[in-house]
Amino acid sequence: MRRTLRALAAAGLLAASSIVAVALGGTAAADTVICEQYGSTVIQNRYVVQNNKWGTTAQQCINVTSSGFEITTQNGSNPTNGAPTAYPSVFLGCHYTNCSPGTNLPIQVSQISSATSSINYRYVSNAIYNASYDIWLDPSPKRDGVNQMEIMIWLNRQGSIQPIGSPVGNANIDGRNWEVWRGNNGGNNVISYVAPSAISSANLNLLAFINDTRNRGAITNSWYLTSIQAGFEPWQGGAGLAVTNFSAAVNGGGNNNPPPVTTPPPSGSAACAVKYTGNSWNNGFTADVQITNTGSSTINGWTLAYSLPSGQQVTNSWNATVSQSGSSVTARNVGHNGTIPPGGTASFGYQGTLNGAYANPTSFTLNGTACSRS
């Protein structure tokens, strides 16, 4: 996430090449502790584990095992509306000239017959972070610098953090429903797939995510997959987070052509309606929000997006995870109200501070689709 800062900081990898060269001297056998900013080592003679502390000057250390790594020290603390402190991770492929042993990456998307990965995470509760994959692609077979396209797969998030950009809908990939976000961090484009609840163990068909990104027009078959990375983006805390097992494989010799494009028929009405009831006083307000599914299909996982008028700031919420950046508000379902059948409703509320005259928001989108007002 927010790789502009990471990209700038990672340029320092060249200056720290002597550190990396030492770390890459051989496969880690016994546990290896890395505290250097961009220090890395090899495991299983196949994958690179990197500390990649790009967003803070505070100390971060990882303990690398034969199958993954654990964050043992993470003293950085960044605000949740900005960039994370780091991306300690394990990867297959090439990252800033650091390539995993024997990798066949970069490989052209059209030539991929399969791309898979399995992972096991260990989570902690007293930190703000995501557990995520980074899948990097570029129009050229690039082994250094910033790639133009970043696919993120968020398997878990703790705290009021959100992906780059804004939600654009949902996708059913690899047997799961994912909330899809799209944006640009100033250095590269980002499409993020966010799981509605925490996943601690997964076997992923990464080619399905790559194909979905292609089908959204973000890349073409002529682009190159350069690396598959998995780890954590901590904002605050994170000691104890671990990747206990990781594997990834990309096979070539394929003919990965896109399916025929079909255009869905236009819809005559919105598939959702929102009732927004506000109550204000001198310097505060509350709001009750009811979402009605006016469509014919069940909604599995929802994100409601809208803008609050000037002077309103959310302070706490119930029955939804509500985050605010400037005037933009994003409300996500919690576990018990993520499914809305046709004709059904889901409700949530929040309290906030008020500076000036009160007014209700005027427009809403649910999973990227405009809603009517009720």
Image (cartoon, helix red, strand yellow):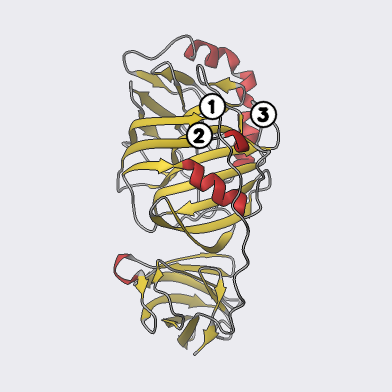
Q: Mark 2 touching mark 1, by CB under 8 A?
A: yes
Front-lying residue, 7 or 259: 259
The residue wearing badge 2 is 228
Residue 182: image location, x then y, percent: 59, 56
Numbered disc 3: secondary structure: loop
Which of the numbered marks, if any, corresponds to residue 142?
Answer: 3
> Mark 2 and mark 3: span between their CA atoms?
14 Å
Q: CA distance from mark 3 to mark 1?
A: 10 Å
Amino acid at pointer 1 = Gly
CA gap, disc 2 and disc 1 = 6 Å
Circle 1 residue? 93
Residue 307 appears in the rendering: no
Mark 2 or mark 3, which has the lower sequence index? 3
Q: Is residue 232 left or right of residue 200?
A: right
Image height check: is 312 above or below 40?
below
Q: Is residue 226 above or below residue 3?
A: above
Which amino acid type corresponds to the residue marked 3 in the rendered image? Lys
Residue 45 spot, x, y in % from top left: 42, 15
Residue at x 64% of width, y 19% of height: 15
Q: Is residue 61 left or right of residue 224?
A: left
Circle 1: element type: strand
**123 up-or-down from 108: above or below:** below
N-terminal of the pair, mark 3 or mark 1, is 1
The reply to whether residue 98 is in sight is yes
Per the image, label 2 sits on a secondary structure element best described as: strand
Mark 3 packing: few (<14 Cα in 10 Å), some, or many (20+)?
many
Within-10-Å neighbours for mark 1: few <14, some 14–19, many 20+: many
**Residue type (three-letter) at the residue carrying disc 2:** Ile
Q: Position of residue 164 (x, y in %)?
A: 57, 53
Image spot of residue 168 (x, y percent): 56, 63
Foreground residue among 160 and 336: 336
Residue 12: quarter of image: top right
